[in-house]
Image (cartoon, grey):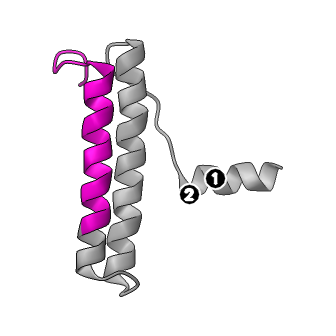
């Protein structure tokens, strides 16, 4: 089980939240970190020729829409998330 945990930590690194704590801000921060990680993977796959630029764009656009939706659903404001 430790190998699986190490692999997950390597593939999906997380950093601790440094902003003003609210549950909404903490959840949004986790969503933002996941977005950044996935965009990095998509960019790398496109660079290596495993994804077409159009597919990469569409996947990143879908992730962006999910992030915007999560932000709206959490009802955070610009003063909460830094």
Residue 35 magenta:
no
Residue bearing mark 1: 8
Check the image and report above or below for 20 versus 28. above
- Residue furthest toward the right? 1
Check the image and report above or below for 56 versus 15. below
Check the image and report above or below for 17 versus 24. below
The part of the chain drawn in magenta is: 58-82
> In which quadrant of the rendered view does residue 23 lie?
top left
Q: Which mark is residue 37?
A: none
Q: Nearer the viewer, residue 39 or 15?
A: 39
Quadrant holding the C terminus:
top left
Residue 70 magenta:
yes
Q: Mark 1 and mark 2: span between their CA atoms?
A: 5 Å
Expressed as whole percent of the image width and height from the top left, the position of residue 44 reads: 37, 73
- Circle 1/circle 2 CB separation < 8 Å: yes
Q: Main secondary structure of the magenta part?
A: helix
Q: Nearer the viewer, residue 70 or 45?
A: 70
Q: Nearer the viewer, residue 26 or 65?
A: 65
Expressed as whole percent of the image width and height from the top left, the position of residue 50 reads: 41, 84
Residue bearing mark 2: 11
Which residue is drawn at the image coordinates 36% and 81% (left, top)? 51
Which residue is drawn at the image coordinates 32% and 70% (left, top)? 43
């Amino acid at each position: 089980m430790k190998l699986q945990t190490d692999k997950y930590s390597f593939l999906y690194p997380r950093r601790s939240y440094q902003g003003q704590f609210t549950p909404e801000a903490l959840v949004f921060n986790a969503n933002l970190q996941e977005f950044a990680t996935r965009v990095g993977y998509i960019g790398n796959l496109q660079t290596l020729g495993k994804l077409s630029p159009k597919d990469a764009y569409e996947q990143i656009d879908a992730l962006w829409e999910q992030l915007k939706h999560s932000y709206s659903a959490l009802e955070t404001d610009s003063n909460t998330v830094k």
